[in-house]
Image (spheres, rainbow, N blue to C red):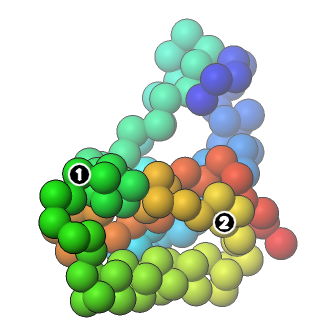
Amino acid sequence: MKKKYINWEECLNLQEIKALIGLKHPNIVVLRELILNNDELDLIFYYDGINLYDHMMSNNTKGLSELEIRNIIYQVLQGLSYMHKNSFIHRDIKPENILMRNDCIKIADFGYFIFF
């Protein structure tokens, strides 16, 4: 986080932090720890592999197979459906915000979302 924070209450009231704490789903990144150090807030996540964009650019074959594409889309839609049921809308879905590790897909970057 780029902003300076005075206390924990201010950090915990951030919409991104509320979303990361409140949303527990296999296709959404897991916030492991928050660290407030010298007025800077650091977010610690579990390692979830590379993002979809890097995976597509490093793929030396003809691209992703139809089965891989279906699997990625299915998991992204599962995560988005869960978010919508919990009154969150992610406004920045793009390949850079979709993380891949083996066959598991996770939605990341909650800096641009709406709580309704």
On the image, numbered disc 2 is attached to which residue?
A: 90
Q: Nearer the viewer, mark 2 or mark 1?
A: 1
- In the figure, 116 relative to 45: above or below? below
Residue 50 image position (x, y, % from top left): 29, 51
Residue 17 image position (x, y, % from top left): 61, 49
Amino acid under disc 2: His
Depth check, front residue: 97 or 41: 97
SS for dot 1: helix
- In the figure, 43 relative to 40: above or below? below
On the image, numbered disc 1 is attached to which residue?
A: 58
> Residue extending furthest front?
62
Q: Residues within 10 Å of mark 1 (few under 14, many from 20)?
A: few
Q: Residues within 10 Å of mark 2 (few under 14, many from 20)?
A: some
- In the figure, 57 relative to 27: above or below? above
Depth check, front residue: 47 or 30: 47
Residue 86 image position (x, y, % from top left): 66, 79
Mark with earlier residue (2, 1) = 1
Q: Quadrant of residue 30?
A: bottom left
